[in-house]
Image (cartoon, rainbow, N blue to C red):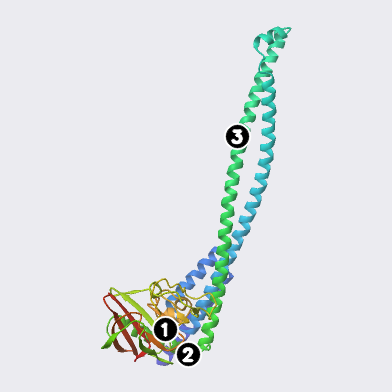
Amino acid sequence: MLKKAVIAIFIFISLFFLTRRVFSLECVQIADTKQREDCLIRQLNDLARTASTLKSEIQYMDTQIALTALKIQQTEEKIKTTEKEIEILNSRIEGLDTSLNYLSKLLVERIIEGYKKRSVSIFNLLFDTSNASELIGKIKYMKTAQDNNQKVLVQVQETKLNFEEQKKLREEKKLELDSLKKTLDNQKATLNNQRLAKQKVLETTQNDETVYQRLLEQTRAEYAAIQGIIARKGSETELRQVTKGETIASIIQGASCNSSGGHLHFIVEENSNVQNPFSYLKSVDNTNCSGSSCGSGDGDPFNPSGGWDWPLNPPIELEQGYGSTWGVRNTWVGRIYSFHNGIDINGSSNNVLAVADGTLYRGIYSVVCALSYVRLVHKDSNIATYYLHVYSN
């Protein structure tokens, strides 16, 4: 009986994954682009909720790539349509311009002709006309000429109005075209970024499920430790008063609480709320390695705008930025957390420096893993800074 149950479960699991694979193929094979887009979005949302293996992670990335490629196709089609509309408008405007010139010239000629005949009165007509029939004919001709002049004037006004409307519409279409081209550039950059992200995941995990699961567990453990420290659950000891620029710790080389490489995780807290460190740190020489590779241009923003000296000697190498980072959006990290509450950096040495005068505390959080850190409570301030993956000096 137990054997039959195991076989039934195996068949169910096999059918489940087979169905998901067929669903993926069905999305790509749908001819209607809107229906294909909806299908890919549904699959993406489904995978985002359930992805817990390297295989599902790669399938999620493949679906992202397919969706972005589809959006590129849609944008390129919109660009072609808009360019055709602009071409049609150019033709219309050219035709209206020709008509306007002709009607304006005609109207001027008739106005001049009417001006020459302005002194002719009914009495002149009476004396210059031999009979009543000829008189009536001349009066009708004058009336018809006036009516025709009025019609030409109306035509000129309508053509001019239409001309201006078509020119305005053309300018709107040109702006739309510029916007579409910028969107296309961004989409192509996103597609390249997604492909690089997939490549990086495969390289980091060596396309091995065991490695992927270990990375997930390491990230989960480190994140839990960082959250515990911010919640003041770490075990702390007051060390001493320090001054700005003083060496207060050293970066731990190698693994630290499941972090695979040495770095400083720097957190700024003001009024007990985590803040963006870039709002406090000054501009500095740097290399941005937070994206698919160092200097790739797809990494997290590096935009310091404050006045603090950095906690490491420059040049600074950014490993991960603040907030919704490249790693969160493109790697297994996003399976564990959606917001990075500090910045991960390296400098020209392992010495960690105080960014302000204050009271220094040494701490350790040891629940999921042992993460050592120091905390600096800034003097005469409601600010505290955290320096993680370090040992105190």
The relative height of residue 57 versus residue 105 in the rendered view (above or below) is below
The mark that comes first in sequence, 3 or 2, is 3
Towards the viewer: 10 or 72: 72
Residue 119: x percent and y percent? 66, 15
Label annotation for residue 157 = 3
Q: Position of residue 179 (x, y in %)?
A: 55, 59
On the question of residue 385 being in view, the answer is yes
Query: Residues at badges 3 and 1 in contact (C-beta under 8 Å)?
Result: no
Residue 284's label in the rendered image is none
Q: Which of the pair 78/323 is nearer the observer?
A: 323
Q: Label 3, label 2: how many angstroms apart (C-alpha)?
A: 76 Å
Based on the displayed image, in which of its 4 quarters is residue 188 positioned?
A: bottom right
- Lateral position of residue 281 relative to residue 384, left or right: right
Which residue lies at the image location 38% right of the left edge and 81% below the top edge?
266
In front: label 2 or label 1: 1
Asked whether, in this view, residue 352 is left or right of residue 361, the answer is: right
* Count of marks, rendered view: 3
Q: Amino acid at mark 1?
A: Leu
Residue 312: numbered disc: 1
Q: Mark 1 packing: few (<14 Cα in 10 Å), some, or many (20+)?
A: many
Q: Name the front one of labels 3 and 2.
A: 3
> How far is the residue under mark 2 from the one under mark 1?
31 Å
Residue picked out by circle 2: 211
Picture quadrant of residue 308: bottom left
Position of residue 21 measured from the top left corner of the image (x, y, whole percent): 53, 78
Classify the position of the N terminus by image quarter.
Answer: bottom left
Q: Secondary structure at mark 3?
A: helix
Q: Earlier in the sequence, mark 3 or mark 1?
A: 3
**Which amino acid type corresponds to the residue marked 2 in the rendered image?**
Val
**Residue at 63% from the left image edge and 48% from the top image edge:** 89
